[in-house]
Amino acid sequence: MKRLPVIIGILICCLSVFAQPGGRGGAIQLIADGDNFLRQGVFDRALQAYASAIARDPTYAQAYMKRASLNAKLSNNREAIEDYNKAIALNPYVEYI
């Protein structure tokens, strides 16, 4: 019975992280938006969505990879290399890097 308040406190803390409008959840949604724009061929909006995802969660390596891939496709090589390097620094073990 004494553990119940501790468990409730932990649950509230965990739920508050997921309930925030920013963070990883918001970044994931922005990545999905960017992917949709990419499929539609609206590259500038896709870049904006990926940049917004990075702003929401600067530790999300996949957001950097998405933006790097699109920048490489658009021949924005300097920007692509910077994003690839940041993604690798954040998560050097991910297999698609």
Image (tube, rainbow, N blue to C red):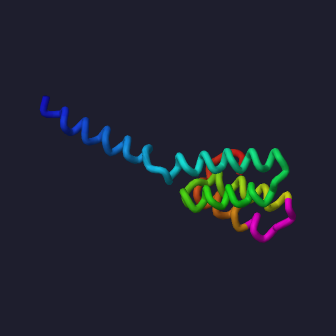
Residue farthest left in this picture? 2
**In x, y percent, where is residue 70?**
79, 56
Residue farthest top in this picture? 1
Provide the major secondary structure of the magenta segment: helix
Horizontal side of residue 83 vs 8, given as left or right? right
Task: Tell me where the magenta segment starts and ends, as one range.
Answer: 74-81
Residue for point 85% across, 57% down: 73
Residue for point 66% across, 61% down: 51
Give whichever of 72, 49 is nearer the camera: 49
**In x, y percent, where is residue 48?**
70, 60
- Identify the image quadrant of the N terminus: top left
Residue for point 21% across, 39% down: 6
Horizontal side of residue 57 vs 76, given as left or right? left
**In x, y percent, where is residue 9?**
25, 41
Whether the magenta-drawn stretch holds residue 86 is answered as no
Number of marks present in the image shown: 0
Horizontal side of residue 10 vs 19, given as left or right? left
Residue farthest bottom in this picture? 78
Give whichever of 23, 40 is nearer the camera: 40
Residue for point 82% across, 67% down: 76
**In x, y percent, where is residue 49?**
68, 56
